[in-house]
Amino acid sequence: MSAGTLYDKVWELHRVADLPGGATQLFIGLHLIHEVTSPQAFAALNDLGLTVRHPERTVATVDHIVPTTSQARPFADPLAEAMLATLEGNCARHGITLHGLGSGRQGIVHVIAPELGLTQPGMTVACGDSHTSTHGAFGAIAFGIGTSQVRDVLASQSLAMGKLKVRRIRVDGALQSGVYAKDLVLHVIRTLGVKGGVGYAYEFAGPAIEALSMEERMTLCNMAIEGGARCGYVNPDAVTFAYLKGRPHAPTGDAWERAVAWWSSLASGPEASFDDEVVFDAATIAPTITWGITPGQAIGVDETVPTLEQTESDERPIAEEAYRYMDLRPGAPIEGLPVDVCFIGSCTNGRLSDLRAAADVARGRRVAAGIKAFVVPGSEQVAAEAEAEGLDAVFRAAGFEWREPGCSMCLAMNPDRLEGRQISASSSNRNFKGRQGSATGRTLLMSPAMVAAAAVSGHVADVRRLVAAPTTPEPETASTRA
Amino acid sequence: MSATPFPAGPIQRCEGRAVVVPGDDIDTDRIIPARYLKCVTFDGLAEGVFADDRSERAGDHPFDRAENQGAAILVVNRNFGCGSSREHAPQALMRWGLRAVIGESFAEIFFGNCLALGIPCLSADHDAVLALQAAIAAHPGAVLQLDLEPPLVRLVAGSEVLEWPLSLPAGPRRMLVSGEWNGTAQLVAHDGELRATASRLPYLTGFAAA
């Protein structure tokens, strides 16, 4: 049993009561809601004659259903319009802050809460969305919940939960140039499997994790759920505090000093014990890409689609299903595979550093003929910052479309979707059958830089070859020779 | 579609015909594709259950076969319900008529969402699940009797009775059997405890309590 970990400390602090069924009643410090999984929760609350206990601890935005071309109201899709109108009505009725379209603060829920400083170390964070694990990047315990649980948090600011085990994922070494947090997490999932994390919280630690920026840590924790772990986290450190300082909801003055002291005390100490530990070497990880229909079916860009002989026996049925669905031959190289659509965005990779990495690849190049490529900033703030530094112009000049913020083609609850058997290079998080809006559409998950590389190449390409060469190589002279 | 009422009160057993959906890692996007999430109530979700898989199989999907209509127990394989946290997935299954799920393993959020609806997800080891699926195939229309205490499933086909032990963690089992699986009232009732917890959280007290 784990002890002395950040998870244990935060759990203990938020424990309200032990419930007769054996579960723990856990206080939820921050509750995030959006238009898809909250309407039925408010209706149920109403049916029970209950009110929202802590409206100031719930924050709302709209992300899944918003169009990314024109966000003028009413939306062309009456169902989407009804969902947003319902959210607006519920928030107004219960006194909940809604960061709506055009507010300057709207965006994907897992992008806006960190950028507003709402997400902080030591909190419990819940949201009716599985990618709530993202917020663990701050040293919070953050997890996705269903709509019945959204109702419970609204009513009581708490949840009935069972305690998880804790697995430390220690990553030594350093990532190569052209290899990002997305590659790292796909590599972890490929190694431990899509259900390897069921029953666990993942603590990401070690030199390679400490070297990651906050945005990279968010990418990493975002996809813990794709490895089966309901929450993933990174211990808070100077990188975390530097990111938070000055954000709208961050503490100020003396409270800031007290907060940093408390946050620092939460990290898993040297005495912490874990239920399990797995060690990786960051230096061995290549740009990683999925070839199949689960996020665990991933390979390095320089590898070939695994054959059945190379696949564990219990993974063979789903490998065979993936060969058929993806129309890929076992043993075929993934590099060079033609793509139709290139999507940069999502709660996994729709932040400023993601757009910068993709823009570095796109700059001075052109999207290959016949490819639809588009960039969807994760929030209005990301869009404004990207535009301020001219990234939109870089993308447009290269032939990418520059869109309005939202979840877009990650899950296609809006007009952005694949058609027929199109194949997409996507910086999102799920390559499930039908995920991107066509029942036969195909998804290759990869980093935003790799998506940009695919867009300008017309096929899956190794981004290391596009970014590794320095733009102004140092001339070799007698004085620089050994 | 379901003619029986939705789960309520203590849940100790379940009886009915089974529908088998084979395959590992069946995610909630497959159980209910995202376009069906464009709604503000769960009412119409039964129509969308496995929609894309069913259209791909053109009438030959387990949920479309005549002998499976009216089934109450879903039998699956490994890591069922992975992916999105959408409660729409168990809601759609429940509204189609299902009242229990048996499989090798379940994704955590899916398991919890089912529990919140009073739908037990029971597990058995790999070989037992395959044997159960084979027995169901060999006895079309046979009735399964599912018990929660102790957790087991029995297949009754004429004079033949086959039985497999199942597992269900003690906490969820107690919640279902006692009827406390729908615990909003219980959470709300802990008013004093909720106040006490909030008062010791540094981020709710200007970090004065840190």
Image: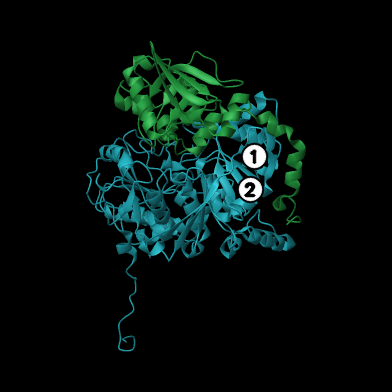
Q: Gap in Å between the C-alphas at discs 1 and 2? A: 10 Å
Residue corresponding to mark 1 = A24
**The one of A461 and A397 positioned closer to us in this rendering:** A461
Which chain does tag 1 point to? A
Looking at the image, is A234 positioned above or below residue A437? below
* Circle on res. A148: none
x and y percentages locating residue B197 in the rendered image:
73, 45
Relative horizontal placement of residue A162, taking residue A409 as reference (left or right): right
Which tint was used for chain B? green
Q: Locate the C terminus of chain A by quadrant.
A: bottom left
Chain letter for the cyan colouring in the rendering:
A
**The one of A27 and A335 positioned closer to us in this rendering:** A27
Q: Residue furthest bottom?
A: A479
* Circle on res. A11: 2
Residue at (70%, 63%) from the top-left corner?
Answer: A257
Q: Are marks 1 and 2 in contact (CB under 8 Å)?
A: yes
x and y percentages locating residue A328 in the rendered image:
24, 43
Q: Secondary structure at mark 1?
A: strand
Relative horizontal placement of residue A5, taking residue B97 as reference (left or right): right
Quarter of the figure with residue B103: top left
**Whether residue A69 can be seen here:** no
Instruction: Looking at the image, tell me whether mark 1 or mark 2 is earlier in sequence order.
Output: 2
x and y percentages locating residue A419 in the rendered image:
32, 36
Relative horizontal placement of residue A385, taking residue A328 as reference (left or right): right
Mark 1, other Cα within 10 Å: few <14 / some 14–19 / many ≥20: many
Total marks placed: 2
Residue at (56%, 56%) from the top-left corner?
Answer: A273
| Tag 1: amino acid | Thr
